[in-house]
Image: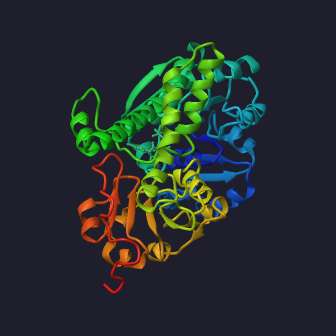
Amino acid sequence: MSENEPLGIIGVGWVGLVSAVCFAELGHPIKAVDIDAEKVALLREGSTPIHEPRLDELLERNRDRILFTTEISEALEAARLLFCCVDTPPTYSGDADLSRVREVVANLRGDGEHALVMKSTVPVGTGASIVRGLAGLPYVSCPEFLKEGSAIDDFMNPDRVVIGAATDDAWAADAVAAAYAPLGAALVRTDVASAEMVKLASNAFLATKISFINEIANVSEEVGADVAEVARGMGLDERIGAAFLRPGIGFGGSCFPKDISALKLLAGNSGYHFQLLNAVIEVNELQKRRVIGKLTKHLGSLAGKRVALLGLAFKPDTDDMREASSLVLAARLEGEGASVSGYDPVAAATAAELLPGVELADTVEAALEGADAAVLVTEWPEFAHLDWALLGAKMANPLLVDGRNFLDPDVLRAAGFAYEGIGRPAAALGDAEPIGTADRGT
Ligand code: UGA
């Protein structure tokens, strides 16, 4: 196979677009297909529809190598490997919606000339079911592990590349392995079902780590331990590892909540009750709501109070708000009778659609004006360098709940704030000056 084998990418969402620009950067001519004509037109002009570091730069540099089109036939003509990157959102039942995957398959013939390379996250058994429906279709499961916000770096420096295929489809698996070879990553060659399971199990395990450290944080609050110290001590054990031990107000995004629910249902449908995942999901839901308790501890009833949400995206460096903790929090606060303001450096447009009741501000300062409390929801780097004394003076009451343990409690307290973190020694009541007596002039 030539080093620069043309590749077809079907679906240019987060995974598809990042894969397209990165494979182009590695020298492959790309036919990138999407049914959304507007998105295709935008990409042809060189604009990207998502906020992702380095994406614009890579697209610009590789524009000559990538053809964006709405016609799957163009990809079929040019490439033998078709990377399926369409989304698989959750249905009402929590199962993955595979209708877009099926639409892609409907365009293929089992002529053995084209291989379908599944990068979309799908339930275990999807590959087998596709091949049953279209005999003779070479099929490779090649799950994607990139994170939004660092997607390009993750694609270019993967911890491993997982390639699952039946023995008969070895040529296709070899071709996929060759496309990834320049990245020098560990390669896991396996069967299709195991590759599908690696993806779901990895996301479920990472989510379990988060819910676990969140529970340790909650207990630490009760017993006077500092979860940051606990996580540091735990993470140095190589068997545990330091990653994904950051406590907070719950995980969100388009992947963890959906994939855990899909794995739980997959297990249930096969007759196995996956108990641990139920707890992981429940802990995550309760974690988002614990902020309310921290606010009422200081403010009493939230009715008529004003609360500012700092950061609305589900995590920094993305404008994605799918399953963001801010959505649950805003709804709970509104339910308690509070008015809610919000600020996010990049997710404002998405937030305007999803949070109609929230007064969106253009600056942190404007969001905090007259607020009785602020909640740091997303750890945007710019929040690390704010003048908290100045901002506290704008608020009706300088109380901050740091939902990501992102800020230095000493700095906040020196600036006159009552500071509440997650699993950190809690603020005593009255740490801040009581409402109405704060010196507004300085
Ligand atoms: C996740 C996985 O990390 C990727 O490997 C996977 O490819 C992707 O899902 C997917 O299935 O497509 P992503 O959803 O982009 O990636 O975001 P993460 O950085 O993993 O964060 C997920 C959530 O966990 C965020 O809400 C984040 O704030 C939260 N988190 C993460 C914590 O609360 N604590 C941590 O220690 C780490």
Residue positioned 44% across, 76% down in the render: 365
Residue 103 locus on image (x, y percent): 76, 36
- Residue extending farthest to the bottom is 441
What colour-coding does the image apply?
rainbow
Q: Is residue 359 above or below residue 273?
A: below
How many numbered discs sit on the rendered protein? Answer: 0
Residue 74 can be seen in this image: yes
Q: Is residue 437 above or below residue 59?
A: below
Is 181 or 398 nearer to us in this picture? 398
Position of the C terminus by quadrant: bottom left
Q: Position of residue 295 (x, y in %)?
A: 45, 57
The residue shown at (48%, 36%) is 283
- Residue 175 makes an appearance in the image: no
Residue 350 as seen in the image, left or right of residue 292: right
**Coordinates of residue 358 in the picture (x, y in percent):** 60, 66
Please state which of residues 152 and 357 is positioned toward the viewer in this rendering: 357
Q: Position of residue 167 (x, y in %)?
A: 56, 13
For residue 379, what is the image quadrant? bottom left
- Above or below, 118 relative to 307: above
* Residue at image point 52% right, 38% down: 256
Q: Nearer the viewer, residue 349 or 220?
A: 220
**Residue 68, placed above or below residue 160:** below
The residue sitting at 52% across, 19% down in the picture is 194
